[in-house]
Amino acid sequence: MGFFALPSPADDVVWAMIGAGSAAAIAYGVIRNRPVPSRPWWLLCAAVALLFLGDTDYDLVTDTRHLSELFPSPADVFYLAMYPVLAAGLLGLAGPRRRRGRAAIPLDTMILVSGLGLLMWIFLITPHLADSSLSTTQRLLSVAYPVGDVLILATIGRLIVVRRFTPAVLLMTVGAAGLLVTDLVYALSHLRGHGPVGGPVDIGWLLFYGGWAAAALHPSMVELSRPLPVPRQLSTARQVSLLAAALLPSGLLVYEAARGGVLHTPAIAVCASVTTVLVAARFYTLIGDRRSYAARVDIVRTTSAGLVAAHDLHSVRDTLATAVHRLAEGGPHTFRMIMGPRGRPGLDGIAATCDLVEAATLPPLAAAAVAPFSHALACPIRPDRDGDGDAEEGVVLVGGDPELLQLLQAPVETVAAQAALALDRIVLARQITQRDSEQYFRALVQNATDVILIVDADDLRVRYASPSAPSMFGPGELLGADLVEQTDADGRPDVREQLKTAPGGPTGSVADWTLLRRDGQRVEAEVICRDLRGEPAIAGIVVTLRDVTVQRRLQREMTYHAYHDSLTRLMNRTAFRRRLSEASARAERVGSLAGVLYLDLDDFKLVNDTLGHESGDRLLRLVAERILHSLRPYDTAARLGGDEFAVLVEDAPSPQTVYTVADRVVAALARPFDLDGRLVSGRASVGVAFTTDGHNAADLLRQADVALYAAKAQGKGRWLRHDPSLDTQTVERMQLRAELEQALPNGEFLLEYQPIVRLADRTTVGFEALLRWDHPVRGRLMPGQFIEIAEETGAIVAIGNWALSEAAAAAATWPASPDGTAPYVSVNVSARQFRTAGFAEHVLHTLEVSGLPARRLLLEITETLLLRDDEQVWHDLASLRQAGVRVAIDDFGTGYSALNYLRHTPLDVLKLDRVFTSSITTSAHQADLVAGIVDLARRMDLDAVAEGVEQQAELDHLLRAGCAYGQGYLFARPMSSEDARAWTSASDHR
C-alpha cells in the first residue's frame, strides 16, 4: 500500500519502474526457461512493454501540461496497440496451430468475441456512441477499448479451456482479470483517460504487471508452449461456452422484448448472422480435423505394417522417412535416422523421450543432420535388449518449422517406438541366421508376443512354432499340423493361396486370417508371410501372426454406428443417401426404376409432449419394426432423424410396385400402437418420388419431402407422389411464411365477432372473436390458411396477444342490457401461447388496460394443452380463474381426448365442434352422442355451447338435448367490432 501513499511525481517514477520491471521479468523468464516456441511469450512481453510505454507517455504529457486527465492522448496509440499484440500472444499459447506457418483461424475465440462483443455493444459501446458531448475521435476510442477488452477476455478464456489452470495460467488469469476489471471500471465511470496514478483502481494494473511477470518466471510457463494432443472431441467446457455464445443473441432478444421493446435489432441480427456463419465454419474445421486425424492414423497403421515387414536397417529407415514425408504433407523438413552401437560417442545428451528442441542444444553430429533448420524433433530409438553386445541405439531427427514439428511429435514418437521394436526383431532374425541353430532361435523369440511359425512349403505343415503360439491357437500340439486347417473354412482358399505365393522380398504379403482355436473360440490375426526357403537356417515359409481380434471388432462397431441409427438399428441418413446414390446411378445406367418413400409421423410431437420422450423412443422402435415388415426382402429402410423415415424400393417393375409398398406402410402405421396398455397413434404421411423424376439422391429426397408435406396438407395419414406442381405449392408456402412475419407490424390482421346466443330466447350473451388476415394480394384469408404456419414459426404468440388485446378493448365498449349485464368476449388461445412464460400476468394486464371486467372474458383452449403434466399451465389456469376469467374447452371430442382431465381442470364452458352439430339431424347415433355430451357438461356444472348451428332443425335437436347456448349462421354471421356494438344496442336481439 506504500505506493498509493507516494506523492507526485514520485509515484509516476515508481509506476514506470513497475511497468518496465514487469516487461524485463517476462523477457528474463523467456531467456531462462527457454520455451519452444518462444514467440508467443515475446509477444506478451511486447504487450506489457506497450502498456508501460503508454503509461509513461501519459504521465509525461499530463505532468507537462498540468492536467489531471487527457482524452484522447498520444498514449492511446500504445494502449490500443497492446490489445492485438496481447491477443496474438495468448492465441499462440492456446494453440492448436496449422502447418507451414499458417495459424489456425481461432473460430472458438471469434464465436466468443462475437457474443461478448454484442454485450459490450449494447451495454457499453452504444452509450458512448450516443453521447453527443464526445468528439468523433473520442467515440472511436471509447469503442476501441471495449473491443480490445472483449478480445483479451475471449483469448484468455480460450487459454484456460485449452491449457487448464496450471500455475502460469492461473497467474496470467489473475493479471488479465485485473486489467479487464480496471478497464471496465474506467469505461463505466468516465472516459478511457488513464487518469492520475496512485488511485485504488490502479490495483488492477498492478495485478496485471505482477501476475504476468510471475507467470513468465514460473517454470510451468514452458508447458504452455508444448504441443497439445489432437482432441477427439470438444471438451464439455468448450461446448458450454460456445453454446452460450451462440445463444446469446437470442437471449438478449428475449431480454429486450421482455423489457418492452427490442432496441438493438440490427446489432442482434448482425451478431446472430456472424455467429451462425462462425459455428458453421467451426463444424467445417471439426470435420477437417477429423479427416486429418484419420489420415494420420492410417499413415501410422501403414507404417506399422511396413515396419513389421522390414528386414534390415535400410528398410526401417526408408519406411520411417516415407512416414515422416507423408505426415508433413510436403512441408519443408529434413529427416535423418542415426544408428550405431550402444554408447556411440557423438549422441550423448539426446533426451530419453521424444522432444522438440533447439538445434543448437543438440550434439554436433545431430545438429548438422537437421541443418538449416533451427529446431528439431529428436526421438530416441533404444531397442529393449539390455546386455546384448550387438544391440544398437540411435535417434530419429526431424528438422523443420516448430509448428510443423509440434504436429508431427505424437505420430513420429509412435512410429519411432515401433521402429525400435522392428530393429529389435531384425537383430533377432540376424542372430538366428548367424547362429544357424533352431534351438537358439526358439530361445530368442520365446518372449515375443507375436506368433512366429515356420511352415513347410510343400505340405504347409507347421515345422516350428514360437512359445506364444498357444495364446493364439489354444492348448495342444501345433507342430506337424496343417496350418490351413487351423483357419476358418470360408477363408481357407485365400490362406492357401497366400502361403503358396508368399514373396521372398522384405515386405512379404499381408492379410487377415480367422483362426479356429481348439477351445472353439475364433481369433482374428494380422498375418505376414515371407518365403525364406533360400535361407539355409530356415528353409521354409515364415508366418508372423498378431492377434487383432479386439481392434477389428472395434473397427466393425465404429463402422456400424457410423452408418446406423442407434435407436432403431436402421440405416442412418448418411448410409441411406449413399445407398440411394448407388441405386439412382444404377437405375440410370441399366434403365431400371427405383422409388423413394419419405415418411413423417403425423402426431409424434404430441406423444413426446404427453407421454414423455422415453415413450416416444419406444414408439419410434415399433414404427421401425412395422416399416420393415411392410417391405420386400430387398427393400431398404432408414431413419433420417427425429420422426422421419425413408424407404428405398429398388428394381421396381413398374410404379405400381412402389405404390403398393406405400399403401402397405401407410396401412401398417395407421393401426394404433400399444404402449403399456395405452393406445398411441403412429399414423404417418408419405411422399413418393421416382428415379425418373430426379437427377441424383439429393433431388429425390427433396422431391419426396415436398410430396410428404403436400400429403400432410391434404389430411395426413396418406401418401402422395411428387408432382412438379407441388414445388410451386412449396414456394407458395414459404412465401406465405415470409409474408406472415410482416402481417402484424403492417396492421393486416383484424377481428370479426360472431354472436353466442341463449338458444331458448336467442338472447345474445357473448361474442367469439375470430381472426382474419386481410392480405394485400391474396385478399381475406381464414385462420385455416395461415394458423398452422404461425404455429410453426412461433408468430402465433404475438398474433394471439394482439388478438386478446383487440378483443378486450372492443368488448369494453359494448353496452349493457337493461338488467345490467353486457355480453362477454370469447378469445381462442393456442397451446404455445398459453405455455409462454408470464401469460396469466399478460391477460390480467390486458384486462386492466382495457377496463374489461374479468368475468366478461372467456379463454378458449384445446384439449391437448391439458394432456401434458405442466405445472405452469395448471398454475396459470388457477390464477386466471381466481381473478374471474372463465375458461372453455374448444372443439371438445375431436382431439386427443382423455375425459379424466374434466374432473381436475377448472373449466366453465364446453364447446361442441361443428362436426357434431352438422350431423345431428342425419344421424341418430350422432344425436345421442351430442345429448350425452350435453348431459355430461350439465352434470359437471359446465355450460355447453354448440358451434356451427345453421338450420332450424339443428336448433330443435339441440333444444331437445338440453343444450343452452349456440352460435352459427342461423343467428348471425361474423361481424366487425362496430357492427357487434350496434348488434348489442338493438333491443330486438337481446
Image (cartoon, rainbow, N blue to C red):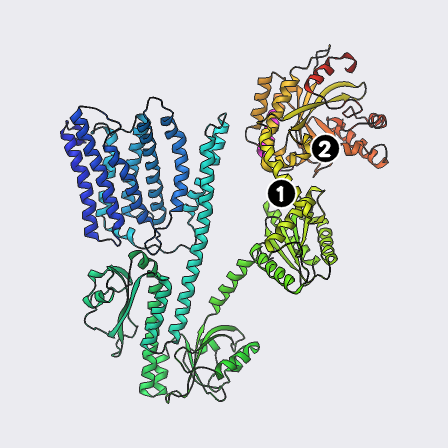
- Residue stretch in magenta: 866-880
* Magenta stretch: includes residue 867: yes
Residue type, mark 2 in image? Asp
Does residue 167 lie above or below 649 as drawn?
above
Q: Position of residue 298 (x, y in %)?
A: 43, 65
Residue type, mark 1 in image? Lys
Residue at mark 2: 891
761 vs 204, left or right, is right
Q: Quadrant of the C terminus?
A: top right
* Magenta stretch: includes residue 954: no
Asked whether residue 191 is in view, the answer is yes
Residue at mark 1: 605
Does residue 940 lie above or below 621 as drawn?
above
635 vs 517, left or right, is right
Q: Give the Cα distance between marks 1 and 2.
A: 20 Å
Does residue 673 lie above or below 454 as drawn?
above
Earlier along the polypeptide chain: callout 1 or callout 2? 1
Which image quarter: residue 979? Answer: top right
